[in-house]
């Protein structure tokens, strides 16, 4: 154990515990970097990854799982250890979202090349921005010397302290802290990620001279924005007719020509209108998610038989138009 003195309090940091966290990060880096390679240079895709993986407590690459697992294993739980869990998540130096946590992954040489630089910087900006905003929102002090663990202090982690005051038994304190993380802290983190605007992320890259290269080439099938696309919403929140799909036919500087087979027409778009490559793997994932539902899989089988019948060709075209957002 090492001891760090601060104003009126003593904070204990278990080096063995921190070592386990570092090892956890090392094991998850490969998965995360592989995923960043796949999702490309789309800011919204990087945001989606942070929401669905990095901050998703049900995902095996989430950034907090090792901390929470070790916290649950503690034989004794007091007010200080509960607040230390939050510190181990948010501390800008040693926390999961700090330099010695996910920051070490950002320094991995695989993320420094021209091909990965933009993706790394986008995720780094998202994490840093959200961590800082979250700290202000819940009263987590950036300076360890100002972290007063006295429950009567209302400046440092006031909401958690209110919960700890009510929970007098150790088991109840542990349960209440985990519930606070699951129902309040992490959902707030996710909402903060969602609130980040694509144009702000792009502006950071532009300011730093990092070019956001397109993730598509000729003949790629891409998703592109239509007139009803709302830039203030995430891709998954768009109206069904706000996004369409087509094949890239020409790339002339910032101008992209896309052939939409449903409309049998070429559509002119700019690079900023391209959401990203169409991911056929998602179709497989959707089927996999309903494979245990006999009723839904029965409907899939019947629809497959419907598609095979050439006499339904016109109806299939109508269905494709509806699904792709074309009228």
Image (spheres, rainbow, N blue to C red):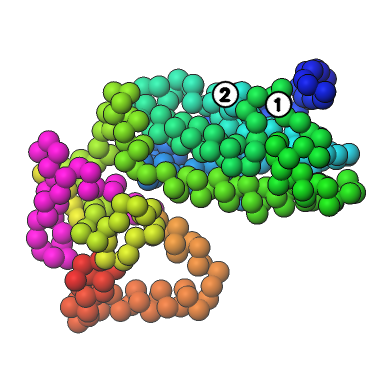
Q: Residue 200 or 2: which is nearer the viewer?
A: 200
Q: Earlier in the sequence, mark 2 or mark 1?
A: 2
> Is 105 placed left or right of 117 in the picture?
right
Instruction: Please name the residue shown 36% across and 22% down the image.
Output: 113
User: Which residue occupies the foreground of this view, 133 or 112?
Assistant: 133
Q: Comparing marks 2 and 1, which lies closer to the viewer?
A: 1
Instruction: Please give the name of the residue rendered at 38% of the width and 53% of the height, measured from the top-left corner.
Output: 234
The percent coordinates of residue 197 (x first, y second) are 37, 44
Vertical order, 17 against 249 (above or below): above
Residue marked by disc 1: 146
Query: Any magenta on residue 270?
Result: yes
Query: In x, y percent, where is residue 282?
Result: 40, 56
- Residue closer to the observer: 262 or 11: 11
- Point 85% across, 51% down: residue: 167
Q: Secondary structure at mark 2?
A: loop
**Mark 1: which secondary structure?**
helix
The residue at 41%/29% (across/down) is 121
Determine the CA span between mark 2 and mark 1: 20 Å
Crowd rating for badge 2 (residues with CA inside 10 Å; few <14, some 14–19, many 20+) = some
Horizontally, residue 307 falls left or right of residue 169, namely left
Q: Which residue is mark 2?
A: 99
Q: Which is nearer the eye, 286 or 172?
A: 172
Indicate yes or no whether the magenta region holds residue 17: no
Q: Which residues are magenta?
A: 252-281
Q: Quadrant of the N terminus?
A: top right
Question: Looking at the rendered structure, which numbered label has been put on residue 253?
Answer: none
Query: Can residue 307 be seen?
Result: yes
């Amino acid at each position: 154990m090492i001891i760090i003195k601060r104003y009126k309090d003593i904070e204990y940091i278990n080096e063995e515990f921190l070592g386990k966290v570092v090892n956890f990060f090392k094991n998850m880096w490969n998965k995360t970097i592989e995923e960043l390679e796949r999702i490309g240079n789309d800011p919204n895709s990087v945001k989606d990854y942070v929401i669905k993986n990095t901050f998703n407590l049900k995902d095996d690459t989430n950034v907090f799982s090792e901390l929470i697992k070790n916290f649950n294993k503690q034989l004794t739980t007091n007010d200080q250890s509960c607040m230390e869990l939050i510190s181990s998540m948010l501390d800008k130096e040693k926390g999961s979202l700090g330099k010695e946590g996910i920051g070490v992954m950002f320094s991995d040489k695989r993320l420094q090349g021209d091909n990965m630089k933009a993706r790394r910087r986008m995720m780094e900006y998202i994490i840093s921005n959200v961590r800082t905003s979250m700290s202000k929102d819940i009263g987590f002090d950036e300076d360890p010397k100002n972290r007063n663990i006295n429950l009567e202090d209302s400046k440092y982690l006031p909401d958690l302290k209110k919960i700890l005051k009510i929970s007098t038994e150790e088991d109840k304190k542990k349960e209440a802290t985990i519930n606070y993380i699951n129902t309040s802290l992490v959902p707030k983190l996710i909402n903060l990620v969602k609130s980040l605007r694509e144009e702000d992320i792009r502006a950071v890259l532009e300011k730093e001279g990092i070019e956001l290269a397109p993730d598509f080439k000729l003949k790629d099938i891409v998703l592109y924005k239509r007139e009803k696309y709302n830039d203030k919403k995430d891709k998954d929140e768009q109206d069904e007719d706000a996004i369409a799909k087509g094949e890239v036919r020409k790339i002339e500087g910032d101008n992209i020509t896309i052939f939409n087979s449903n409309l049998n027409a070429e559509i002119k778009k700019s690079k900023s209108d391209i959401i990203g490559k169409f991911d056929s793997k998602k179709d497989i994932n959707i089927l996999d998610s309903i494979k245990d539902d006999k009723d839904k899989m029965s409907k899939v089988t019947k629809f497959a038989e419907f598609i095979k019948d050439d006499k339904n060709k016109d109806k299939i075209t109508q269905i494709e138009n509806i699904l792709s957002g074309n009228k």
